[in-house]
Image (cartoon, rainbow, N blue to C red):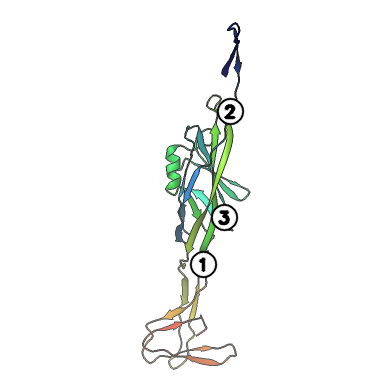
């Protein structure tokens, strides 16, 4: 409270009173920096989130980091052993610290900047994604220790996921037949648990003087031309 007094010019008498002045806390928007990150499909990609309060008095804290615009099928998670907390709210990932009010310790803010929050794209998906990240700073009344006001800073974060082909499975069955006759080769190939397809099949160690052929969609036998002892088939056909 302020002290206010008045003095008379005639007899120098005075009177004093107290004037209460209330100053409402107003939070300052925090600093928030993000670096573009990249990785390969089906792998964990650490998001580098650098955020800090900007209030010079030191009575504000970072109380949450929110990640929005997460693409369909992608997930947000935390590194193993993290002390952070992650909650999904209306499709957005909200990360908070281990303090009772949800604020981050200094070590946790450092961990955010080192990629402790992890992005994993949808299975077999690749491409470039633009996420939105929001850091919230909250002002705390030092006398009552209550949170009184908050401010946010939002910035985009680019995540690039490059394609990485899965290893296909090839299955064959032993084949037999008479000399000078045709012998059917039973070959199958696929990419398990994946949306990818087999682009080619290569047959090697073909004996000298042998030939390969296949039956087309009209039932006609077609020769397969090759040189040396191997051939690459761009599609899997019955040969």
Location of residue 164 with respect to 172 vertically, above or below:
above
Q: Residue 236 in the image: x percent, y percent?
A: 51, 80
Q: Is residue 80 visible?
A: no
What x and y, as percent, mark residue 37? Answer: 45, 57
**Disc 3 marks which residue?**
70
Q: Nearer the viewer, residue 120 or 24?
A: 24
At label 2, counting other C-alpha atoms closer than 10 Å, the crowd grade (few under 14, some 14-19, many 20 or more) is few
Q: Is residue 221 above or below residue 14?
A: below
Tell me the distance, in whole angstroms, between the alpha carbons under discs 1 and 2: 65 Å
Label 3 to label 2: alpha-carbon separation: 40 Å
**Height in image: 26 above or below 167?**
above
Res 167 visible: yes
Q: From the viewer's perspective, is 32 left or right of 69?
A: left
Circle 2 sits in a helix, a strand or a loop, which is it? loop
Most extreme residue toward the bottom is 180
User: Quick check: 181 above or below 139?
Assistant: below
> Circle 3 sits in a helix, a strand or a loop, which is it?
loop
Residue mark closest to the camera, 1 vs 2? 2
Q: What secondary structure is found at the residue carrying circle 1?
A: loop
List x then y, in percent, for residue 88. Answer: 59, 47
Cα distance, mark 1 to mark 3? 26 Å
Which mark is on residue 23? 2
Closer to the chain start, of discs 1 and 2, is 2
114 to the left or right of 67: left
For discs 3 and 2, the disc positioned in front in the rendered view: 2
In this view, the residue in front, 62 or 224, is 62
On the image, numbered disc 1 is attached to which residue?
Answer: 192
Image point (55%, 52%), residue name: 132
Instruction: Give neighbour class at mark 3: few <14, some 14-19, many 20+ (Cα, 10 Å).
Output: some
Q: Is 147 placed left or right of 112 in the picture? A: right
């Amino acid at each position: 409270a302020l002290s206010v007094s008045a003095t008379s010019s005639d007899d120098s008498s005075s009177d004093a009173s107290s004037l209460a002045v209330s100053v409402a806390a107003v939070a300052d928007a925090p600093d928030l920096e993000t670096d573009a990150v990249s990785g390969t499909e089906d792998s964990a990609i650490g998001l580098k989130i650098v955020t800090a309060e900007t209030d010079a008095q030191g009575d504000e804290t970072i109380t949450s980091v929110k990640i929005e615009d997460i693409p369909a099928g992608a997930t947000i998670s935390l590194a193993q052993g993290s002390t952070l907390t992650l909650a999904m709210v209306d499709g957005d990932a909200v990360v908070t610290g281990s303090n009772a009010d949800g604020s981050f310790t200094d070590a946790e803010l450092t961990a955010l900047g080192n990629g402790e929050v992890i992005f994993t794209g949808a299975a077999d998906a690749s491409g470039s994604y633009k996420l939105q990240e929001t850091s919230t700073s909250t002002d705390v009344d030092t006398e009552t220790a209550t949170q009184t006001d908050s401010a946010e800073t939002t910035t985009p974060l680019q995540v690039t996921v490059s394609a990485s082909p899965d290893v296909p499975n090839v299955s064959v069955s032993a084949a037999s037949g008479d000399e000078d006759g045709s012998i059917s080769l039973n070959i199958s190939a696929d990419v398990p648990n994946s949306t990818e397809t087999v682009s080619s099949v290569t047959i090697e160690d073909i004996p000298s003087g042998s030939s390969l052929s296949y039956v087309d969609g009209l039932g006609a036998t077609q020769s397969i031309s090759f040189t040396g002892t191997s051939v690459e088939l761009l599609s899997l056909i019955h040969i």
